Amino acid sequence: MEENLFIQVSEATVKEIQDAMPPEEELQSLGEFFKVFGDPTRLKILYVLLNTEMCVYDISALLGMTQSAISHQLRVLKQMDLVKNRRDGKIIYYSLADDHIVTILSQGLNHIEE
């Protein structure tokens, strides 16, 4: 026998949640931001840069990938403001954009290790 359950949500609660919800465009941007972390190659690059700044050549040698593949992924990471670069002569060095990236990586890893 089915029970007919009627749940009434408080209008005040609904209003509170709606007011706290970020705007649609911010949620869209947040979704795009987290998509970047869905690629294992990008995660490897971020973990490399967690330790030190590096150029494309060194990252490609370390990860056993082509410079072209690394450059492409660095471009994506840079567009999402996850990495920054600095030029020293002809060489461009990449590093994490800020400490937020360290926190995101650490908390994500802690979460899956629990």
Image (cartoon, helix red, strand yellow):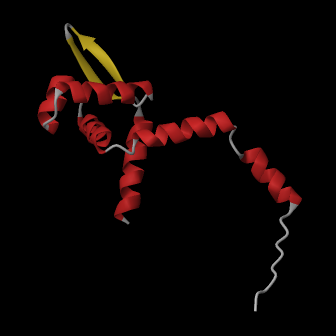
Relative side of 2 to 69, left or right:
right
The quarter of the picture where the C terminus appears is bottom left
Q: Is residue 103 visible?
A: yes
Residue 5, quarter of the rendered image: bottom right
Q: Is residue 13 above or below residue 45?
A: below
The quarter of the picture where the N terminus appears is bottom right
Across the whole image, how many numbered discs are drawn on residues?
0
Nearest to the observer: residue 87 or residue 43: 43
Residue 44, quarter of the rendered image: top left
Relative side of 112 to 22, left or right:
left
Identify the residue at image location x=37%, y=57%.
110
Nearest to the observer: residue 22 or residue 95: 22
Residue 43 percent coordinates (x, y)? 31, 42
Residue 111 percent coordinates (x, y)? 41, 59
Residue 105 percent coordinates (x, y)? 38, 46
Identify the residue at image location x=13%, y=37%.
64
Identify the residue at image location x=32%, y=20%.
85
Residue 16 percent coordinates (x, y)? 80, 52
Q: Is residue 53 visible?
A: no
Q: Residue furthest bottom?
A: 1
Residue 76, quarter of the rendered image: top left
Q: Is residue 103 above or below residue 73?
A: below
Q: Residue furthest top?
A: 89
Q: Residue furthest front?
A: 1
Q: Residue furthest right?
A: 11
Nearest to the observer: residue 20 or residue 3: 3
